[in-house]
Amino acid sequence: MLLIFGLALMLNIGTSAAATVTNGTGIHTSPKVITANPANNSIITKSQTITIKYNTTIKTNTPWIELKNGNTAITTKYYINGSTLCITPTTTLATGIRYSLTIHTNSISDLTGNGNSLYSISFTLSPITLAQMKDGQTRTQAFFNNNQRLPNYVTYGSTKIPIAQFQKIIATQGLKINTKITNPNASLASIMKGAAKYGYSHAASTAAAMERIGAGDCWAMSDYLYTKMTAAHMQARIIQYPTAYSSRHESVQYKQNGVWVNAPYRSYGLNSMFNNTQSNGTVIRCS
């Protein structure tokens, strides 16, 4: 009798232990995403099927899958291939747009019925890469600063992207062109008044050094004026030429109505050592 009781006890223990095992671990787990193509926050060059690979074989459960352009839903169809959920837009996705994909909770499950957790990614469809966007932004901003207008196109080799489309594309990455037009005369007056507080000294030859010690040479003042004018969206340049005091004197000009004009040093009482003595010379820097 004791032997039979012991055998029954062993069988009960074995049965109890086996009953706690679920998916080989004893724990109910949701399917986990291993990879997504496109990856989150990526940039792709053409419309494609979106694939989401899980860590286990999956099946549809209560499908609620959303692909959106902002608040606009994009119609899709989907199928499952083993552990991969494949989502295909029914129409070709447009370029220059950031899309979001959401796979809602319990849309799919593993083979034992464990549903997925909420999952979402975003990606951008663009004919140019992020590096090209930043390069185009820099070139377009420089064009606007110099001409007070946007170019008609942004070019990449033989490819021309209309400016409106380009702005739309870079906006998907949080980039933009500053198109605020400043008053050149007001900016000029402010810049020259700021420059007038600095004295002349051989001890500084850069704007940073001049601002630090309160004085600098003609190179420092030219660096200062050029930097300030460019920041105010004025087209400026530094010219270099010989004078009675220096073989490489520098002064600044700005463009007004398509013509290069000397900075008005004398009108704002700057030290005479900064003044221009001629209006022509070798162009050292030009915005």
Image (cartoon, rainbow, N blue to C red):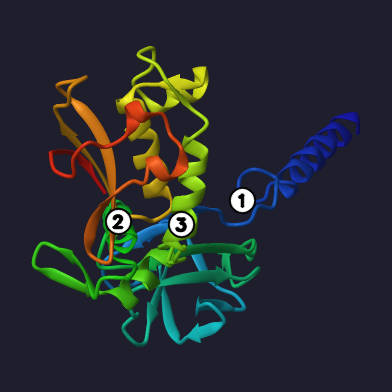
| Labelled pair 2, 1 in contact (Cβ < 8 Å) | no
Q: Few, some or many C-alpha atoms within 10 Å of disc 3 (few <14, some 14-19, many ≥20)?
A: some
Q: CA distance from mark 2 to mark 3?
A: 32 Å
Residue 71 at x, y = what percent?
57, 81
Q: Which residue is mark 1?
A: 23
Pick whichever of labels 1 and 3 is earlier in the sequence. Answer: 1
Residue located 34% across and 80% down the image: 94
Disc marking residue 142? 2
- The type of residue carrying mark 3 is Asn
Residue at the right extreme of this rendering: 1
Residue 84 visible from this viewpoint: no
State which tag comes first along the sequence, 2 or 3: 3
23 over 124 or under it: above or below: above
Kindly tell me whether residue 247 is visible in this rendering: yes
| Mark linked to residue 40 | 3
> Which of these two is toward me, 213 or 71?
213
Residue toward you, 9 or 78: 78
- Number of numbered discs: 3
Q: Write the residue at 34% across / 20% down.
A: 205
Kind of residue at disc 2: Ala
Q: Secondary structure at mark 1?
A: loop
Q: For the residue marked with disc 1, what is the amino acid?
A: Asn
Q: Quadrant of the N terminus?
A: top right
Which of discs 1 and 3 lies nearer the camera? The answer is 3
**Furthest-left residue in this view:** 158
Query: Mark 2 or 3, which is nearer the eye?
Result: 2
Q: Spatial distance from mark 1 to mark 3, Cα to Cα?
A: 29 Å
